[in-house]
Image (cartoon, rainbow, N blue to C red):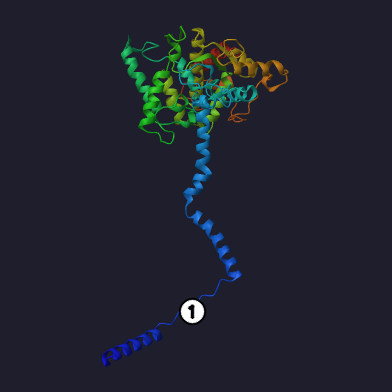
Amino acid sequence: MTAESSSNGAARRRRSKKKSRGTPAEPALAPPSRSDSKERKKTAAKAAPAETQKNPLFVITAVILMPYALYNGYLYLLLQHPELISFLCPSIRPAVKLNDTRQLLIVGTISSGTSQVARDLKNNLGLEIGHENAEASWSFVRDGTVSWFHGIRFIHRPGIDVNVKINGKTNNAGGEIIFLSQVKDLCRELQPQMGFHPFMFRDGICSLRQSWGDCWRDECEDIVKQEWGCGLRRKEDKKLHQRRDDCETPFHKVLHQERHPLRTIESLVAKFCIGGIQGNVQPSFLVFANALFPQHNFSEMSCTEAAGYYVYEYNNAMLKARELGRIDDHFQVEEATPCQIAKAAGFLESDSVYNPSRDRVLKVCNSQGSDSAANQVMKSTENRYNTGLVSLHWGDLLGGKHGSRKKAGDEDLQKRIRRLTQNLGYDAK
C-alpha cells in the first residue's frame, strides 16, 4: 500500500466522522402499541365523513337526483312504455298518446270549483283525472281532465269561427290579424296565477327546466292557435270512420260545469282583486280576459265588473257550444255527486273508452250506499279563496259601485248576469 492511498483513506474516514457528528442518527422505530392502533382507527373513522363533506355533489346526487331519476323512470315505464313490463302485469294499462281519445273533459270558468271536482273524481272513484292537465305521458290523467282553459276550444276564433267587421265591412283577413295579436298577448309572458302552461296540453320540445323564453313562447302560440275554437269545428276521422272535432287531443264526452254566477264572481273578486273589492284587477287576469274576449276592454273596468263580464262571456260561449251539440251535457256543482258526474260522462256506458275504469266506477257507485262519499254532494275543501271575504248582491253589479266608472245605476252587467243565471238553471231573484 502506497503512502498516497493511505493518506486518502484517512481523509475519507475523517470526513465520514464529521458527517456523522453533523447529522444525528434517526432513532429506531418501536413496534406499535395496542393503544396506538386504537387511536389510529378512531382517527380514520373521523376522517371519512370529512371527505364526504368536501364533495356535496355526492350528497345531492344520493339524496335528490337518484330518487328523482327513479321516479321519472317509473313514469316512463308505466305511462309511455308499459309493454316493457307487461310480463310482470299482463293487465297493465296501455299508453295513452297525444292523439288518443280520453273519456272526459269538463270545462268551467275559473272559481267554479274545477279543482274540487277533479279531486273528488280521482279520490272517490279512483279515476285518473287531471286538473288543468291533459298531458298523459308524464301524468296520471288518462281518464280525463277538468279545466277552465280547455274551454278555449269552444270560444269563437276571430276570422274563422266568427266574422269580424272593420269599418262596417266583414273582413276575415283583418280578423286573423286580430287573432294573432291576441295569441301573442297570451303567450308573451308566463302567467302561473291563471293555471295555464303549454305543458298541460302536450310534452313538446321545450324543457320544464327552461325559463320562459322563445322556445316556450313558440310552443304556447302553436298550442293556442290549434286549440282556440277547435271544438266548434268538425273533421273526418278516417280511422274511426266518423266526424270529430278539430282538436289535437279528443275526448269522448265533454261536460260544462256550472256554478251560480254571483258566487263565482265573489270568488274571482277575492282571488284577483288587489286590495279587496275596491282594488285593482291583477294584471294576469286582464291579459287573459282581454285576449279571450276582445269585445270588452277589461282594463277600464272595476274589479267586480271585470269578473262579471268574464263570467258572462265564458259561460255564454259554453252555452252556445251546448246548443250546437259540441258539449254533451252539464251539471251544477252545488248539487252534483261524483257518481252523477261519472254517469253524465259516459263512464257507465258499454262504449266507454277504457273498460277497467268503467268497471271501477260501476263497482263504487252501485255497491256503496247513498251515504258514501261517491254518492254525496261534493263539499268545498279545495282552493277556498273566498271564506267570508266577499259577499255580493244584485245591487253590487250596478254602475257606479265599487270603483265602477260607469254611470251610476247602469244596469248592463246586472241584466246580463241575471239572464245568464236563469239560462244556467238558477234562481235569479
Residue 401 makes an appearance in the image: no
Task: Please name the amino acid that badge 1 sits on.
Answer: Pro
Residue at the front extreme of this rendering: 1
Number of numbered callouts drawn: 1
Q: Residues within 10 Å of mark 1 (few under 14, many from 20)?
A: few
Q: Is residue 343 above or below residue 17?
A: above
Give residue 28's position: percent from left, percent from top: 50, 77
- As rendered, which of 68 and 135 lies closer to the eye? 68
- Taking the image as shown, residue 277 lies to the left or right of residue 230, namely right
Residue located at (53% from left, 60% from top): 47
Q: Nearer the viewer, residue 26 or 38?
A: 26
**Residue 367, x across and y down, in percent:** 71, 17
Q: Residue at x 54, y 10 (%)?
A: 328
- Residue 139, x across and y down, in percent: 52, 27
Q: Of helix, strand and loop, which one carries label 1?
A: loop
Task: State the quadrant of the C terminus.
Answer: top right
Residue 127 visible in the shown view: yes
> Is residue 192 depicted above or below 95 in this figure?
below
Q: Between residue 163 and residue 125, name the one nearer to us.
A: 125
The residue indicated by pointer 1 is 27
Residue 220 is left or right of residue 410, and the answer is left
Question: Where residue 69 sits: x, y (%)?
Answer: 50, 37
Quadrant where the image shows the N terminus: bottom left
| Residue 161 sits above or below residue 66 on the image | above
Figure check: 9 above or below 308: below
Q: Nearer the viewer, residue 283 or 122?
A: 122
